[in-house]
Amino acid sequence: MPRNPVAVYAELLRQAQDVMGLDDPMSARSRLYTLLRPHHLERYPELQEVLKRLGIGAGYARNHLLSLGGWPDDVVDLVRRGLPLRVARRLAHVELSVRKEALKRAEEDRRSLDDATWGQRVERALERLAREADAPDVVPEDGWLPPAVGGDGHPPDGAPGPTGDVWRFPTLGARSRADEELHPDLARAILARYTAPGDAIVDLTAGAGTVAQVAAQRGVRSWSSDVHPRAPFVHAMDARDVQFTDGLTPGCADLVLLHPPTFAWWEKARPTGSVAGPEGYADLIADLLAGAIQVAAPHALLVLVGRPVRSEGIVRTAIGELQRELEDVGTTLIGYHVGVDARGTEDWHVLVGRRLTDT
Ligand SMILES: C[S@@+](CC[C@H](N)C(=O)[O-])C[C@H]1O[C@@H](n2cnc3c(N)ncnc32)[C@H](O)[C@@H]1O
C-alpha cells in the first residue's frame, strides 16, 4: 500500500534526528536540506541507510518531503488526506482565502459527477482563480484590453499552437461548463492559428472574457462584450444590436469571434417572444453574425464556435447550418476545427470564415 508522504516525512525526520544525534525534528529538517545534496550525502552512509530503509531517493526527500515542514498546517493536512504533493505545493503558495475557494470549487466539481481526480480538480480551480485574479477589474479607458508584454518585450505566450484540426482540451470545472466557457486552450488554439501580435480582435459573446485574456498573452488587443458580462472588462451589449460606443468602431477587427450559447442553454433562457426551437435558434445565430460583420475589417476573419443542435435524442441541425449562416454574411469558410474535451462529452466546432471583398 502506498505510504502517505506526511507519514514518510515524519519518519525521515525521526530517523535522521537519531542518526545525527540531534535534539528535535526541526533541526533535523534544516540539516537535511544541506546533507541531502549529493556531494554531502556521499559522506553520510548512516543517512544513506535511512533513505534506503524508507525506500526513497535523496531528491524526493529534499525537494518534496522537506517542503512539507514549511507549509501551512491545513495544506499538510490535505496531503495527509491524499492530495498529491505537486498540487499541495501550489496551494501552499496562495493565500488561505484562495485555498479555501479552490477547495470549495473542487468539491462542487466532485458533486457534478466529474471523473477528474481530486488533485486535477484542485489544480483546475487554482488555474481558474488565477485567471480571475489577472482579469482587469475595470473596462480599459479606450474600451480595448491591451496586449501584455513579457520581460523581453515580446508577448508572454508566443507558442506556435496546435497543428491539425482536432484539438483536445482538459475538461472544464462544473461552473465553467454551466456557463459554457471556452477552455483557454481552445482560445489559444484559435488565436495561435489565426492572429498575429498587433492584431485587434472583437469578441461579441465574451462571457467571462476568456478569449480576451488569452489574446492579451499573445500580444493581441481585444474588445469584448456580452449581453450578460461576467468579467469587469467585458462591455454590456446585445450583439444583435451593435452600438459603436466605448471604442468599438465599424470595421475595427482583424478577427471577430462569436461563441453563442448552445441550443440547450438558449432554450432554457430563451427571451420571451422569440421563436422556439431550432428555427428560433438559427435566427439568433443569423442576428449575431449580422452584428459581427459590422465590426469586421474588409480582410477580417469571422470565427464561429458552436455545437450541433441536439435535442430529444435527435440531431436537429448539424454544422452545415453554421457554415451557411457564415456564408450568408459574405464570408467563405477557410478553416474548420473540432475541440473535444478529455471526457469526450464536449465538442466545440470552430468554423472560420474569411470576409469576401469585391476586389
Ligand atoms: C457559450 S457562452 C460564451 C462564453 C465565453 N466564450 C467564455 O469563455 O466565457 C455564450 C455567451 O453568449 C452570451 N449571449 C447570449 N445572447 C447574446 C446576445 N444577444 N448578445 C451578446 N451576448 C449574448 C451569453 O450571455 C453567454 O455569455
Image (tube, grey):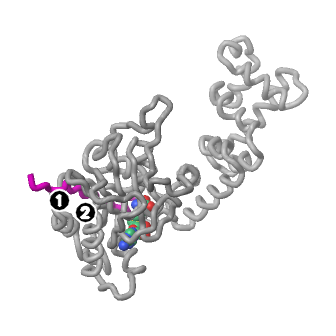
Stretch in magenta: 343-359
The mark found on residue 346 in the picture is: none
Separation of marks 1 and 2 at Cα, in angstroms: 9 Å
The residue singled out by tag 1 in the image is 331
Residue 354: say if magenta.
yes
Q: In terms of image quarters, where does ligand 1 lie?
A: bottom left
Q: Outermost residue toward the right?
A: 23
Question: Vertical placement of 53 versus 251: above or below?
Answer: above
Residue at left offset 45%, top offset 53%? 142
Q: Is residue 185 left or right of residue 11?
A: left
Q: Visible in this render: residue 185?
A: yes
* Number of numbered discs on residues: 2
Closer-to-camera residue (229/54)? 229
| Element at label 1 | strand
- Disc 2, SS: helix
Q: Residue at x 25, y 49 (%)?
A: 165
* CB within 8 Å, label 1 to label 2: yes
State the residue position of label 2. 293
Q: Of the residues shown, which amino acid type is indicated by label 1? A: Thr
Q: Judge from the rendering whether residue 123 lies leftward or rightward of residue 318; answer left or right.
A: right
x, y percent for residue 174: 51, 64
Q: Residue at x 83, y 31 (%)?
A: 26
Q: Nearer the viewer, residue 17 or 194?
A: 194
Question: Measured from the top left, where is residue 330 in percent x and y?
Answer: 16, 62
Quadrant in the rendering for residue 349: bottom left
* 319 w.r.t. 13: above or below: below
Dot 2 crowding, Cα within 10 Å, few <14, some 14–19, many 20+:
many
Residue 37 or 48: which is nearer the viewer? 37
